């Protein structure tokens, strides 16, 4: 559209400052604070797995007022599902739907303290943008399909009025009359009766557009000119989004269509949000599949190692050239590798069976619950010879009174947890050191721990100790992950801490078995 006149300066415009004017203080920091405040920011500081470390800002605006440290961010906000674990430098998702229903621009970035999740209010921008394109497209399609012959505009005016648009017939320059039903909002904007509308006198943008429209109407023939979208203040002070189309019909009539575009399209917005959520879930599933594929390759690789040792031992024995002492060493080596592979296979089966048996029955009352102190004594006695053969002393630190420590759980799987921790300690402890197993009552729970004299856990590995394939405890890190899944399914916890004198302590805590324990847990979950 060609410019017909220079627009008048806005009432708030300032004259250019003279070169001799005194310098003003730098207002940049104040402006930045103002702009940030207008976006109503809220933030979550999370660990790479999505655990909340810190929360602040306008959390109430986005339905996150109850978020507290220790919560899972994806469980609190569906817009974060599929984004954790997060290891990338940064990501931006515009216009996501927050738990309160309000739209926000979501920014994620890695910082030295953790993953920063920043929410900036985007509701106003979303409300403006989404309906405009759709309504403009609807109007274009209607005009393209309409075969303008004779003067069918009377019926068309009623149709377009139902679409929140007005059809105006040009009477003279700048004067129009309504065709069909004219929407009330346009009558109020123009401030006059429908038979003598002068929209250009009340709508400055439209006044400029009518210059181009008059060029079309005087050119003869047929055609149309679009104004593009502009905004006007409505009668109630609300902002209206409008678009005008000037049309010259083949029959010689001159028309102006003005359409209001600020109606909300909730169904379309929900559809876009669902598509975005689906895309996030799909991305999350892809990451999980990729992780499982990597894990499977790691498992195959680790199982091949002991198998190669066994095959080498058998090959040496088949040769028949070894004396009795050397043959005994080779047999011991083969048995050691077979035991190692057996343990790996057991860990793999334990992990996948835990995935399928999350709701397996376990004991919560003293009558059937396992005795943690007894399990610890039996595991120490059963594994002491294996530790002694490696030159490592295995000790037990338990009360001498023989008191029971009945805990929530299932005996076989509890034995497996303790065995995993002891085997992990043996792998990382050198000859001449001591591994200690301890058990104690801890309030309404029981606590067990395994202390080793190894090199300890590096800071890089520690955050991933209990993740599948990421623990660094063994080649694939399945054992500690299996321990975590098992203990958490019983309402327990597992953790690690460095020992002051060197080495590591792996501990776990389980609630004491008692009558009514399961009912109390259910009541607490429903509160």
Image: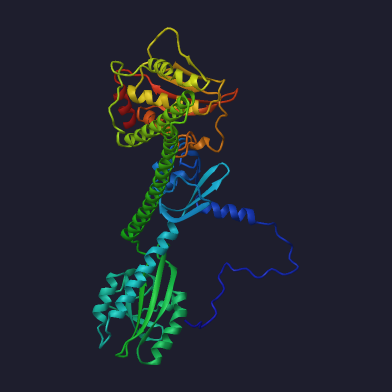
The x and y percentages for residue 452 are 53, 23
Please indicate, yes or no, whether residue 64 appears anywhere in the rendered image: no
In this view, the residue farthest toward the right is 20
Question: 248 or 205: nearer the eye?
Answer: 248
Question: 252 or 73: nearer the eye?
Answer: 73
Question: 283 or 268: nearer the eye?
Answer: 283
Quarter of the picture holding the C terminus:
top left
349 shown above or below 510: below
In this view, the residue farthest toward the front is 321
The x and y percentages for residue 427 are 50, 28
Please indicate, yes or no, whether residue 439 appears anywhere in the rendered image: yes
Instruction: Indicate the quadrant where residue 518 lies.
Output: top left
370 shown above or below 150: above
- Identify the residue at image location x=40%, y=8%: 402
The x and y percentages for residue 342 are 38, 31
Instruction: Indicate the quadrant where residue 103 lies.
Output: bottom left
358 shown above or below 17: above
The x and y percentages for residue 66 are 43, 38
Is 213 situated left or right of 497 in this image?
A: left
317 shown above or below 116: above
Is 149 situated left or right of 233 in this image?
A: left
Colour mode of the rendering: rainbow
How many numbered badges does the structure rendering display? Answer: 0
In this view, the residue farthest toward the bottom is 220
């Amino acid at each position: 559209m060609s410019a017909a006149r220079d627009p008048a300066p806005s009432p708030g415009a300032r004259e250019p400052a003279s070169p001799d004017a005194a310098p003003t203080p730098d207002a940049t920091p104040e402006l930045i604070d103002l702009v940030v405040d207008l976006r109503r920011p809220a933030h979550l500081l999370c660990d790479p797995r999505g655990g909340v470390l810190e929360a602040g800002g306008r959390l109430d605006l986005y339905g996150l007022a109850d978020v507290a440290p220790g919560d899972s961010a994806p469980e609190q906000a569906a817009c974060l599902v599929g984004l954790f674990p997060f290891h990338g430098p940064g990501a931006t998702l515009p216009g996501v739907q927050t738990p309160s229903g309000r739209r926000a621009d979501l920014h994620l970035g890695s910082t030295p303290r953790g993953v920063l999740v920043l929410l900036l209010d985007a509701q106003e921008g979303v409300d403006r943008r989404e309906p405009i394109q759709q309504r403009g497209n609807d109007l274009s399609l209607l005009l393209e399909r309409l075969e303008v012959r004779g003067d069918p505009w009377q019926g068309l005016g009623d149709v377009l009025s139902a679409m929140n648009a007005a059809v105006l017939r040009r009477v003279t320059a700048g004067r129009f009359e309504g065709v069909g039903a004219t929407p009330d909002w346009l009558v109020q904007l123009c401030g006059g009766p429908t038979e003598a509308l002068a929209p250009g006198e009340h709508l400055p943008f439209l006044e400029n557009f009518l210059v181009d429209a008059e060029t079309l109407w005087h050119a003869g023939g047929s055609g149309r000119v679009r104004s593009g979208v502009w905004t006007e203040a409505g009668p109630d002070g609300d902002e209206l989004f409008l678009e005008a189309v000037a049309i010259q019909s083949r029959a010689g009539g001159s028309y102006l269509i003005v359409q209001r575009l600020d109606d909300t399209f909730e169904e379309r917005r929900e559809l876009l949000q669902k598509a975005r959520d689906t895309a996030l879930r799909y991305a999350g599933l892809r990451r999980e599949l990729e992780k499982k594929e990597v894990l499977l390759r790691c498992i195959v690789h680790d199982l091949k190692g002991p198998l190669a040792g066994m095959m080498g031992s058998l090959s040496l024995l088949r040769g028949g050239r070894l004396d009795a002492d050397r043959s005994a060493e080779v047999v011991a080596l083969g048995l050691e590798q077979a035991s190692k592979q057996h343990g790996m296979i057991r860990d793999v089966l334990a992990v996948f069976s835990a995935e399928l048996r999350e709701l397996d029955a376990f004991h919560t009352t003293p009558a059937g619950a396992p005795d943690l102190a007894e399990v610890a004594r039996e595991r120490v006695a059963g594994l002491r010879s294996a530790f002694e053969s490696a030159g490592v002393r295995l000790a037990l630190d338990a009360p001498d009174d023989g008191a029971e420590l009945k805990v929530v759980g299932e005996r076989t799987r509890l034995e497996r947890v303790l065995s995993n921790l002891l085997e992990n300690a043996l792998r990382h402890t050198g000859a001449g050191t001591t591994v200690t197993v301890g058990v104690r009552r801890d309030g309404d729970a029981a606590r067990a721990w395994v202390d080793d004299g190894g090199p300890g856990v590096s800071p890089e590995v520690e955050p991933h100790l209990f993740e599948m394939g990421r623990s660094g405890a063994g080649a694939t890190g399945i054992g500690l992950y299996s321990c975590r899944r098992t203990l958490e399914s019983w309402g327990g916890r597992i953790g690690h801490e460095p020992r002051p004198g060197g080495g590591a302590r792996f501990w776990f805590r389980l609630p004491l078995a008692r009558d009514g324990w399961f009912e109390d847990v259910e009541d607490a979950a429903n509160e």
